[in-house]
Image: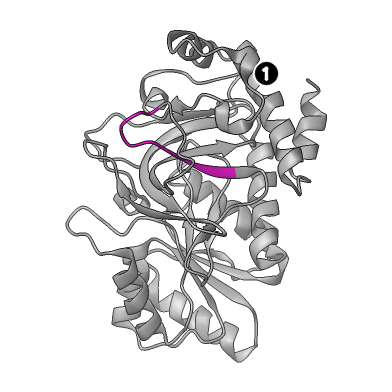
Amino acid sequence: MNIDNYIKKIFQINNEVEFNDYALKLFHYQYKNNNIYNEYIRLIKCKIDTITHYSQIPFLPIEFFRTKRIISTKKPDQHIFLSSGTTSSLKSKHHITDLEVYKKSINKGFELFFGSPKEFIFLCLVPSFTKNKHSSLAFMCNELINLSNHPNSGFYLNENEKLISTIRQCQKENNKFILLGLSFELLKIANNYNIPLLDGLVIETGGTKNKQKRIVKEDMHNRLKRLFQTENIISEYGMAELLSQSYYCNKNFFKSPPWKKILIRNKTNPLEIETKSHRGHINIIDLANIYSCGFIATNDTGQLTQSGFNITGRSQNASNRGCNLMI
């Protein structure tokens, strides 16, 4: 497989036939080059010659990222992203051999849902990348800040007065801006400052829990809408083991870019993909994960909708996960 051509083509996918073609290409490449994935496929006695559709491809349990080096190349690591679990838990490691693929996925995905990052000022309420080098979320925010190329784009965690001043400046000058951050940090700003965000976008980055408490996502969104006086709160769904994001954009479901797909596996048979029920455990195909594993069985539970998917919870006995655990 021509890797450079594959990387170029996956970001141009626009139909199911093309997705299936590149998913099968990736599967055969990773079966050949990823020792852990190859061993797992052999252990479950999968007959690879019978696979003709992406739904038939085996999904590697996400737990393997905690204990094994999941890699599909002999290239050296450029970076390692760690999951944001509790300090006492064993964290997942995503070995990255080409950061440019992640950068391209961030940029192309954002453009698909919101337009060019150059059009926005990014006000990020997450720990900065300089202090959190192993956070894929911090890297994503840092990349969007760099793409924005605006002096006011930056990390604003624990700089509340500067943040509020910058928001007011953006509103005064009619600059498009995005307040992007951890759910509880957004809620803290909303509670402590009476500032409407009628002209700005608000993106919360996943988990609605921290070390002390938990808030149902819908409740979190309703509070943020009321306090920020905005009709739309956007959610981002990603994880350290992936290189592509999905977004929840005021349509009551998450939507993924064309090179990423969500499938639902049976609650009692982890090797079975649901075709009748739309509820169960979430499997993810991320074609950008070319150098690790693009086929992951997560511990999230969810359901498919007509045009996307929703997250409904976590599997029992699954470890804590969520960006708010970073702080």
Give yes or no for residue 265 being in the magenta stretch.
Answer: yes
Is 55 placed above or below 153 here?
Answer: above
Q: In terms of depth relative to the viewer, which is nearer, 249 or 67?
A: 249
Is 219 placed above or below 253 here?
Answer: below
User: Is 6 placed left or right of 101 in the picture?
Assistant: right
Query: Quick one: quadrant of the N terminus?
Result: top right
Q: In terms of depth relative to the viewer, which is nearer, 176 or 111?
A: 111
- Quadrant of the rendered structure where residue 187 is? bottom left
Residue range (magenta)? 261-270
Q: Which residue is mark 1?
A: 29
Residue name at image x 74 percent, y 32 percent: 21
Residue name at image x 54 percent, y 47 percent: 139
Where is residue 231 shown, x and y percent of the image?
A: 47, 83
Q: Is residue 121 visible?
A: yes
Q: In terms of depth relative to the viewer, which is nearer, 52 or 106?
A: 52
Residue name at image x 48 percent, y 48 percent: 238
Where is residue 203 shown, x and y percent of the image?
A: 49, 66
Where is residue 234 shown, x and y percent of the image?
A: 49, 68
Q: Is residue 149 visible?
A: no
Is 222 placed above or below 13 here?
Answer: below
The local secondary structure at tag 1 comes to: helix
